[in-house]
Image (tube, rainbow, N blue to C red):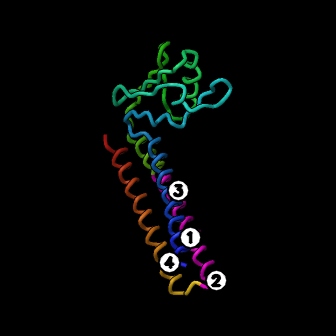
Amino acid sequence: MNEELNMIFDMAKESMQGSIQHLANELLKIRAGKASPAMLDGIFVEYYGSSTPLNQVANVNTPDARTLTVQPWEKSMLEPIEKAIINSNLGLNPQNNGDIIIINIPTLTEERRRTLLKQAKAEGENAKVGIRNARKDANDEVKRLQKDGLPEDMAKDAEEEVQKITNSFSNKVDELIEKKEKDIMTV
């Protein structure tokens, strides 16, 4: 029985860790006024008929805190990359100089900072929903084991352990959001 409970705990932790990882990736995309190559991670470019991640057809660099440069490996990719960046809804305005694409990252207005903060908090809430779903799945498994003969006191202990794991991961979400909030609101 203990082996099965440990498997349930491990599955819950793995699922909750997935939520944390997804949150961290989403927070990287929310720009805090500083240029970061990760800002362009979600952009796909048409490359020989297939949709390809930008970082697989070009080199993305940050020469300074307010500038991104995109150096395509093939000159013919300049225009498709430029179009993909414009169509990405990131609010970026790429300039194509014939060799590379230069993107100046505008400073954030107070209103834009608040919008980004709401977006970050919404991502945090989504992560918590994922964590709660993992908790529910784990508790359902414990209940199933209880029907199969797991003693009630062991089932209660298992549910308490699942709750401890859940609280730990919820705290990680809060820490990530708090850190991102400081990042966004720092002028």
Q: Which residue does the numbered mark 4 point to in the structure image?
A: 158
Q: What amino acid is found at the position of numbered circle 3 in the picture?
A: Asn
Q: Residues within 10 Å of mark 1 (few under 14, many from 20)?
A: many
x, y percent for residue 51:
63, 31
Camera-side residue of 174 and 17: 17
The answer to the question of whether label 2 and label 4 lie on touching residues, with beta carbons closer than 8 A, is no
CA separation in Å, label 1 and label 2: 14 Å
Q: Residues under labels 3 and 4: Cα distance?
A: 25 Å
Mark 3 crowdedness (10 Å alpha carbons): few <14, some 14-19, many ≥20: some
Disc 1 secondary structure class: helix
Find residue 139 and report its horizontal and vertical position in percent: 56, 74
Report the span colored magenta. 121-149
Q: Read off the residue under disc 2.
A: 147
Label 2 SS? helix
Precedes in sequence: disc 1 or disc 2: 1
- Circle 3 sits on which residue? 126
Q: Nearer the viewer, residue 3 or 17?
A: 3
